[in-house]
Image: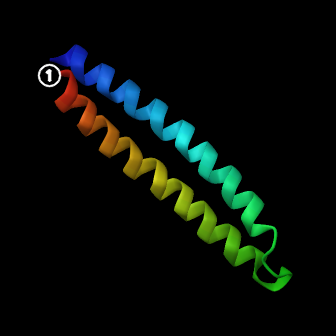
Amino acid sequence: MQAVTRKASYIGRLVAVVTTLLLAVYLVRTLRSVPAAWQGTARAVGGVAAVTWYLLTYRIVKRIGLEWLK
C-alpha cells in the first residue's frame, strides 16, 4: 500500500508541476496587458491563483491515482 501511495504522490506532483507551469506562462502573458496601476495587484492575484492551482491539482490527481492504482 505504501508503494501505491508513493507512486500516486509522484504522479500528482508531476501533473501539478506541469499544469502549474502552463498556467504560470498563461498568466504572465495575460497579465502584461493589465494597466500599470494594477500590475502589483494582478501579480499577487496571479501568484495566489498559481499556488492554489498547484495544491488543488496535486490533491485531486493523487486521490485519482490512489483509486486507479489500487
* Label 1: few (<14), some (14–19) or many (≥20) C-alpha neighbours in 10 Å: few
Looking at the image, the residue that sits furthest to the top is 3
Q: Amino acid at mark 1?
A: Lys
Compared across the picture, whether 19 is left or right of 66 comes to: right
Q: Quadrant of residue 44?
A: bottom right
Q: Quadrant of the C terminus?
A: top left
Which residue is at 62% across, 65% downward? Answer: 46
Query: How many numbered circles are shown?
Result: 1
Which residue is at 74% across, 58% downward? Answer: 28
Q: Position of residue 10 (x, y in %)?
A: 39, 25
Q: Position of residue 30 (x, y in %)?
A: 73, 65
Q: Is residue 56 above or below residue 7?
A: below
Which element carries disc 1, helix, strand or loop? loop
Q: Quadrant of the N terminus?
A: top left
Q: Is residue 29 above or below residue 70?
A: below
Name the colouring of the figure: rainbow
Q: Position of residue 24 (x, y in %)?
A: 65, 52
Which residue is at 69% across, 68% downward? Answer: 43
Looking at the image, the residue that sits furthest to the bottom is 37
Compared across the picture, whether 13 is left or right of 38 comes to: left
Please give the residue where the numbered disc 1 appears in the rendered image.
Answer: 70
Q: Is residue 47 above or below residue 65?
A: below
Viewer-side residue, 43 vs 26? 26
Viewer-side residue, 42 vs 27? 27
Looking at the image, the residue that sits furthest to the right is 36
